[in-house]
Structure formats: C-alpha cells, structure tokens
Image (spheres, rainbow, N blue to C red):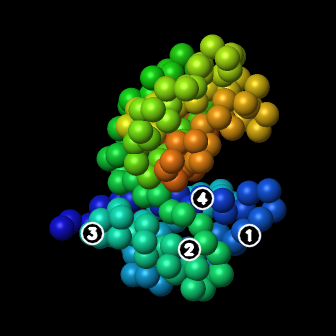
Amino acid sequence: MTARRQVALLRGINVGGRAKVAMADLRRLVGGLGYDGVRTYLQSGNVVLTTAKSPDTVAAEIERAVAAELGLQPRVLVRTRDELAAVIEGNPLPAATWDGSRIFVTFLSAAPPADRLAGIDPAGFAPDVFEARGREIYLHCPDGIHDSKLARALSEKRLGVVATARNWNTVTKLLDLADDG
C-alpha cells in the first residue's frame, strides 16, 4: 500500500482543562510510532501524518501509545486526506460557512443508525441546524456550540458511536496541513 497523508482526531484532549497533552509530546509520541511528516494543529489533539497503514490501524496504535505513555484513554478517529477533502466538498451548509467558527463537523466512528437520528426534530433547535452524511454530521450553531442544545442532543450516547467535533476553520486548516506534506 502506498503511503498517504492522514488526519488523526483525538477526542477530549485539552478540553476544559482535562486530559492535558502538550502538542510537542504528542508529535514525539506519534513520530515514535514510525509515522512520517507528523504535524499537529492547535492544542486539541489534531495530528497530520503520513503512513501506508490503514486509518483503523493508525487509530488503534495512537490510542494504545497515548494510554501507555501518557496514561490517557482518548478515542482516536482517523480520516485520509482524500476523505477529509470529501468532507469539505460535501458540506451541505455552504451558505453558513462564512463564519467558520460557527460551523462544525462531528466526525463519527461509523454512520449512526437511522433510528438514533430520527427522534431529533431540527425545528426544536432553531436557529441551530444539522445534517448527517455518513460518518459526519454537519452542524451550524450561529450562537456557538457551547450552549447549543442541538450539539448536546447529538451526543455519543444518543448516536451510539464515537464522536469528536471540529469547527470549520480547523477542518479546512487540517486539509491544508495534509496538502503541505
């Protein structure tokens, strides 16, 4: 298999003062697993790397290494560079992308079962809106995500899958980093 750029998203790193990890330590740890071109973005567990390994293998290796070396148990979701580009190209909320801090992509470990989403009535969460597309949920929270009842309604527990969200600015920057090689 040919080496390709991938993006690892660590759930819950440096959020609310918990699970603190210096990005230099994370780069060292991931590089020590044999991955090339390791770069991090922001302080929230975003790692871009190059490898021929499958995304599932990358996720499992990073999870084990973080647990062994840092004593933390974050779940890790990985997308290839091309999958991330498709997420950006497939944004069903393009009119809202003018403020990238108010658009979010929730990356999921798998597409949630339809019945898990069926009970969420979008009208009850206005002005917030969402659209699920496979292993991603696009979310527009014009008043921010921290007080969003819709964001809370789209929880891992309700969806039955691992989930981690990134704002649009971060998602597009991660693709830029992946393209920089």
Image: 123 above or below 64: above
Image: 144 above or below 98: below
Q: Which residue is drawn at 54% across and 63% down?
A: 75
Alpha carbons under labels 2 and 3: distance apart: 18 Å
Amino acid type shown at disc 1: Lys
Residue pointed to by mark 3: 52
Query: Where's residue 88, x and y in %?
Result: 43, 35
> Judging from the image, what secondary structure is the residue with disc 1 in?
loop
Q: Residue at x 55, y 26 (%)?
A: 119
- The residue mark sitting in front, 4 or 2, is 4
Query: Where's residue 58, x and y in %?
Result: 39, 69
Residue pointed to by mark 4: 11
| Label 4 vs 2, first from the N-terminus | 4
| Label 4 vs 3, first from the N-terminus | 4
Residue pointed to by mark 2: 27
- The residue mark sitting in front, 2 or 1, is 1
Alpha carbons under labels 1 and 3: distance apart: 29 Å
Crowding near the residue tagged with mark 2, few <14, some 14–19, many ≥20 C-alpha atoms within 10 Å? many
Q: In this view, does 128 lie to the left or right of 110?
A: right
Alpha carbons under labels 4 and 2: distance apart: 16 Å
Amino acid type shown at disc 4: Arg
Residue 20, labelled with which disc? 1
- The residue mark sitting in front, 1 or 3, is 1
Q: Residue at x 58, y 79 (%)?
A: 67
Q: What is the quadrant of residue 17 in the picture?
A: bottom right
Are the residues flagged by discs 2 and 1 in contact, CB closer than 8 Å? no
- The residue mark sitting in front, 1 or 4, is 4
Alpha carbons under labels 2 and 1: distance apart: 14 Å
> Judging from the image, what secondary structure is the residue with disc 3 in?
loop
Amino acid type shown at disc 2: Arg
Crowding near the residue tagged with mark 3, few <14, some 14–19, many ≥20 C-alpha atoms within 10 Å? few
